[in-house]
């Protein structure tokens, strides 16, 4: 079992990789660790925060894809009809973009710190971009 530590704004989370359900996505993402970006509030999808990645190509297809990640689930949209992105659901999400419904690869699930998901969402919504770092738990 691979566990990541995620620091998003002032909040700390632990997340378990979904290696059995999304092995290629997990392998690609693990190869990028530690991964540093900024996270912002979503535009169309509901109660979520995202990391917009433009035309970055992970070289992935769909696996374990969903349009409705549950709170604490993290999905990676590999690109195609919309830009590449990583999305973290903190509440109800209907994953979509200006071109319509999307599906992303569910590859991480937050297991600790879930009580701070909504606060992270509100922080991104009202205060803007927050730093986020994913790294292997030590």
Image (tube, rainbow, N blue to C red):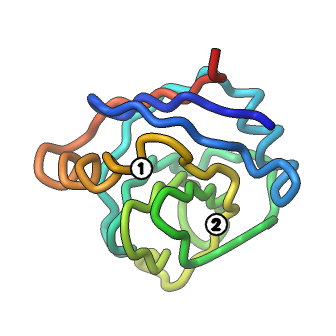
Query: What residue occupies the far top of the structure in this picture?
Result: 138
Q: In this view, does 79 lie above or below 113?
A: below
**Image quarter for residue 3?**
top right
Gap between marks 1 and 2 measured at Cα: 21 Å
Query: What residue occupies the far left of the structure in this picture?
Result: 126
The quadrant in which the N terminus is found is top right
Q: Where is residue 32 in the image (x, y as percent from the top left)?
A: 69, 27
Q: Position of residue 45 (x, y in %)?
A: 39, 74
Q: Where is residue 130 in the image (x, y as percent from the top left)?
A: 29, 35
Q: Which mark is residue 32?
A: none
Of residue 16 and residue 93, the one placed in the foreground of this image is: 16
Which comes sooner in the sequence, label 1 or label 2?
2
Q: Which residue is drawn at 31% across and 67% down?
A: 43
- What residue is shown with label 1? 114
Mark 2, secondary structure of its residue: strand
Q: Which mark is residue 104?
A: 2
């Amino acid at each position: 079992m691979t566990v990541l530590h995620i620091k998003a704004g002032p909040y700390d989370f632990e997340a378990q990789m979904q290696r059995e359900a999304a092995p290629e996505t997990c392998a690609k993402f693990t190869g990028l660790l530690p991964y540093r970006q900024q996270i912002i509030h979503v535009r169309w999808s509901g109660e979520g925060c995202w990391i917009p990645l433009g035309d970055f190509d992970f070289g992935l297809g769909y696996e374990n894809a969903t349009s409705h990640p549950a709170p604490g689930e993290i999905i990676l949209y590999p690109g195609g009809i919309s830009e590449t992105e990583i999305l973290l659901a903190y509440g109800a999400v209907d994953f979509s973009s200006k071109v319509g419904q999307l599906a992303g690869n569910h590859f991480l699930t937050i297991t600790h710190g879930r009580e701070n998901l909504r606060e992270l969402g509100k922080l991104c919504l009202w205060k803007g971009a927050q730093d986020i770092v994913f790294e292997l738990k030590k």
